[in-house]
Amino acid sequence: MNNRPLRTDHVDLLRGMLVERAQDLPQILPPEHRMELENSDEVKRIEDRLHEIGGQLPLLSNQATLLNERKRLYRRKCSLKKKALTSLQRSWHNINYDEEVRQQLLNSAFHIDPKPESRFSILSPFLLERSRLAETLFSPKSGRLSDGEILNDLTSLCIKSEPVLYRPGERPIQGRCPFNKCYKPMESLGKGSRSDHLHICHLKELQGRNAERERRFARGSKLCAHPFTQFCYLCNEWVLEKAQWVRHCEKHLADLSPFCGVLTFRHLLVRPGLCPFCLGDAKQAPPRRFQHWMRKKSHMEHIEGHLECLNLSKRVKCPHPACRSTYPDRESLKNHFEVFHHISAPHNNGESMSKRKLSEIHMESTKRAKAVSDCDAEVKELSKMYIAFDSKTL
């Protein structure tokens, strides 16, 4: 029709309907490709210009032009990363996809190590509609949801828009915090603080109940000001006794997932960071091995401390109990942590700063510039030193 070429892509699609998705397809840019991108001339020029803008902003009263330029530079840098990842995925398909199909059809193991846990499997307890659809939409008729339930879930996904994700059992009621008699409106909090606020209020309420329970059975003995209360992010449940928490940690240590990184989705901490070195240290107590890190920066600093103590006279074995890989040096092991265990360093200060509201940056920069202009020569010099230091740490 209309002299258009005959389509055959639907035939290719149907021919591969029995093949699962390519689980090894790179979803992030591997470290070696990222380093190659960062060493390219265009990215170096972008970084140099961003550094210049960061030094000029605190000294100017009108930063609109520089802020817009910085925004364009960050977008360009992000675009280059996406293009590099797309190019890598295409080359992966050309080289590895046939082997992936063959291995899946033969039902044989392709890797020695277990497959990394997917992001969707981790997020499925929080995304109920998507989880139900993934389990039942293509399942046999006997185990499926009804057509009406499937349609309701699909409609809900199209209509519902939730900028903030909440844990099961920790959702606001009528837009307010329901825990510990707080009743604070969620709209009065920033999106990044809402789920944390509910979690902290829930913690205080549970501690109060636990203290009241101990008070009833203690009969005047000295009570702990903060009764034991621990939250397991992998199970999304609270543990109120130390002995129970030890057994809970032992259960997870016996069946570990390779995923160890900090995972945040829609302003909710879904998974805290775990340390592969601590997980593999059988001499430590289970709670110590299973300790959590809530921020990427502190998580990475802890792991860097372990990496510095490695003996590099022989090949380095991955310390994670569920992994048997060995590597020739520290940098290769670090790359393995990022690709396979999803342990990545936080964005640099410039990238995190670019996510802040431009109005806040403008207000802070204006205050700094005014403070500098009102000082005498000696104080001006000290203020410039402070601003230069502060611009690096923001």
Image: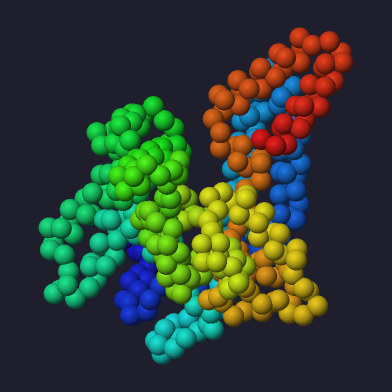
Q: Position of residue 248 (x, y in %)?
A: 41, 65
Q: Position of residue 274 (x, y in %)?
A: 55, 61
Q: Quadrant of residue 182?
A: top left
Q: Residue furthest right?
A: 378
Number of callouts: 0
For the C terminus, give its image quadrant: top right
What residue is rendered at 56% in x and 33% in y?
A: 356
Left or right, 392 with respect to 133, comes to: right
Check the image and report above or below for 49 versus 377.
below
Residue 6 visible from this viewpoint: no
Q: Position of residue 212 (x, y in %)?
A: 32, 42
Check the image and report above or below for 322 versus 164.
below
For the N terminus, give its image quadrant: bottom left
What residue is rendered at 17% in x and 53% in y?
A: 152
Residue 142 visible from this viewpoint: yes
Q: Position of residue 22 (x, y in %)?
A: 45, 73
Check the image and report above or below for 92 versus 56.
below
What residue is rendered at 55% in x and 53% in y?
A: 293
How are the residues colored? rainbow
Give 357 or 251, whichever is nearer the viewer. Answer: 251
Give 267 or 38, whichever is nearer the viewer. Answer: 267
Give 5 or 298, whichever is nearer the viewer. Answer: 298
Left or right, 272 with respect to 184, comes to: right
What residue is rendered at 71% in x and 54% in y?
A: 38
